[in-house]
């Protein structure tokens, strides 16, 4: 079980890196696209980071469910899972923005992307609190 925890934590760290970095990278990609008028290296980096971390997110979810005891999970684990599913929705929304950016469509302002980025931090703080405090 210790190795499952290690794999879970490692994958969570990698996935969180992407959750925090990709929206920020979209800001810089948008600026690069405006300057170059075409797809540049920041776009390639952003797409690769998003794709790589998708696998880490899947492994983190699977190992997290395993550690949680699948359907016999305590209440706090269900709350954690609900918060993690919020992060999954955030990640999917980020992926949609990446796909649009790949086509040269940057709809969101820099400010919107920054707020979107910081919202994920608040959810992660909530997840950490639930894991540490185990409120029920």
Image (cartoon, grey):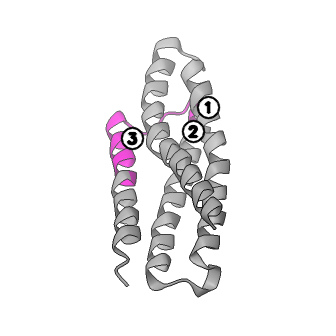
Q: Which mark is residue 102?
A: 1
Q: Which residues are magenta?
A: 100-120
Q: Which residue is mark 3?
A: 113
| Residue 20 among magenta residues | no
Mark pair 1, 2: CA separation? 6 Å
Would you place residue 25 above or below residue 56 in this image?
Answer: above
Mark 3 element type: helix
Q: Quadrant of residue 68?
A: bottom right
- In this rendering, is residue 77 above or below 111? below
What residue is shown with label 2?
98
- Whether pointer 3 and pointer 1 mark residues with C-beta atoms closer than 8 Å, the reply is no
Please check the rendered image and state whether residue 102 is part of the magenta-colored stretch, yes or no. Answer: yes
Q: Quadrant of the C terminus?
A: bottom left
Looking at the image, can residue 36 be seen?
Answer: yes
In contact (CB < 8 Å): disc 1 and disc 2 = yes
Where residue 48 sits: x, y (%)?
A: 64, 33
- At 45% from the left and 67% from the top, the residue drawn is 83
Quadrant, the N terminus: bottom right
Give the x, y percent position of residue 4: 64, 62
SS for dot 2 = helix
């Amino acid at each position: 079980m210790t190795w499952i925890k290690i794999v879970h934590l490692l994958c969570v760290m990698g996935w969180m890196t992407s959750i925090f970095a990709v929206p920020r990278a979209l800001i810089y990609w948008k600026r690069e696209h405006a300057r170059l008028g075409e797809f540049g290296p920041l776009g390639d980096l952003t797409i690769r980071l998003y794709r790589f971390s998708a696998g880490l997110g899947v492994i983190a979810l699977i190992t997290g469910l395993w550690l949680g005891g699948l359907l016999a999970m305590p209440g706090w684990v269900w709350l954690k899972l609900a918060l993690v599913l919020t992060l999954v929705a955030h990640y999917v929304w980020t992926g949609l923005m990446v796909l649009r950016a790949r086509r040269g469509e940057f709809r969101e302002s820099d400010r919107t992307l920054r707020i979107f980025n910081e919202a994920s931090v608040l959810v992660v703080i909530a997840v950490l609190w639930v894991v540490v405090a185990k409120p029920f």
